[in-house]
Image (cartoon, rainbow, N blue to C red):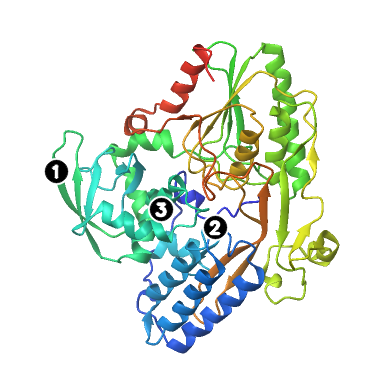
Amino acid sequence: MKTVRLLTALLLGIHATIAFPQSDSLRTRRLTPAAMQADVAYLRRLLQETHPGLYRYVPRPVMQARLDSLAGQLQHPLPFYAFYGKIEGLLASIRCAHTHALPHKDFDNLFRRTWKTLPFFMVPTQNKSYVLFSVDERVKPGYELLTINGQSINAIQAILEPYHWDDGFIQTSRSQAMKGWLFNLFYYWFIDQPDTYRLTFKNLSGDTVRVEAPAMAFTAAFSQMQKLAVNKQMLAWYNTKPTRHPWRVTFPDDVPQTAHLRIDSFGGRGVNSSAEAVTVFNAFMDKLMATLTKKGIQHLIVDLRANPGGWDSQGIELFRYLAKADTAVQYCARQHSLTNDIESEFIKFSDLSEANRKNVKNELEREADGTFTLKGSSARFTPKPNRFRGNVYILMDGASASTTSEFLAVAHANRVGTFIGEESGGAYEGGNGGSFVHLTLPQSGIQVTTPLVSYRNAVPEPLQKGRGTLPDHAVSFTLDDVLNHTDSVLTYTKELIRKGGK
């Protein structure tokens, strides 16, 4: 699905701009019971009238009880962030990766200039949290974070992860709450906003290191990180700017007849429509297929790790270039919406263009259960004549989401290749997305994003609903990989190719 690129840059590769710090007025703001109850009632209407996945993982009576309970909790004034936590906690409990709330419409400015958070960039791996970038020369990359202000990192993780927006029950996706600038913001929003952080680390020798660090806004913290020699190598490796098109291919010299196709996202700079997305992607893929044929490539590694998604159409096209069968294949079993009412007060807040809104009734077909099926959503797609016919190895992890997770599920169901890495970040049976409502709760100003379309992938019913595509070979990124710029998953894949394994 056309993913909401929410906070993707907060995980890696964001660049600071000059900005002057400001105070956070939301910290001192209090909301009255009447204001909060009005916002909850408005949000409830939005969810019940438009969210196609509201009861996908949570039974209707349970979700209705949660909504009733939230309304009943708002009998006394609350600080802004306490109320925001209740809203985001409710939305996260829907278990939809495209349903979330942000505290304010001016999110980018507040993040860069105002929210003073933990001034370290953390990376979670193997159930621990490690420093990648530091503002203190005493704390080096690879140090393990043990406590923040006396609270263990495990206790903090247990508090924060339930606020993260994820499909179903996918832990590899939920752990993204502990990564990068998003972790720092989650701590600030949902735990505390201290002026000073008392931190305990374990260094690479196993010794305990205690430091106190002032809370810093992103721009100030990142500026400090760039100045410190301790971060020089990590910044050179990991703080890279995106390329014009997020696809590239290399030919490893340590494994014969092999190509490594890296797809950062299903997008491309300047692409504004699904048709444009197909055109630019197919131009790249046609050229790639010709090159693979010319070079006699027998093994293709398709690297989709940390790919947050993008245009559905590009995911479908990638499948067509890799499909094994000669016959047309169904990609999506059904896409449906709860409403076709273009006059709805919520649809006017959607990202649908005026032309698309006018055409909604022509695109949707009413079903007996009152939902509306998107016409053509169950179309079958013919494999490309010039498709790759060799061995395919697909790399994935918990940040392989949205369009990417759809591709992974359909490719897995159709046995396109061998899957290596971690459980994908989107539900195997499908998620929610397509188009989105971006709504401001009128009393608090909290920004809510919800999907309009539910997807059912053309895959067999999974044994466990709400799980991602599972790898054939489970391999995880390690701390040594981070510190040495190595790649255990890719290394494993190459060894598999050398041994002729699948």
Numbered disc 3: secondary structure:
helix
Numbered disc 1: secondary structure:
strand
Q: Is residue 239 left or right of residue 132?
A: right
The residue sitting at the left extreme is: 207
Sequence-first tag of 3 and 1: 3
Numbered disc 2: secondary structure:
loop
Question: Can the viewer see residue 203 in this picture?
Answer: yes
Sequence-first tag of 2 and 1: 2
Residue occupied by mark 3: 177
Q: Nearer the viewer, mark 3 or mark 1?
A: 3
Residue occupying image coordinates x 63% and y 14%: 298
Numbered badge on residue 96: 2
Residue occupied by mark 1: 208
Check disc 2 and give the amino acid type: Cys
Q: Is residue 225 left or right of residue 276?
A: left
Check disc 1 and give the amino acid type: Thr
The location of residue 417, given as percent across then percent down, is 61, 26
Quadrant of the frame with the C terminus: top right
Q: Nearer the viewer, mark 2 or mark 1?
A: 2
The location of residue 416, given as percent across then percent down, is 64, 28
The location of residue 428, given as percent across then percent down, is 58, 44
Query: How many residues crowd around disc 3 within 10 Å: few (fewer than 14), some, or many (20 or more)?
Result: many
Query: How many residues crowd around disc 1 within 10 Å: few (fewer than 14), some, or many (20 or more)?
Result: some
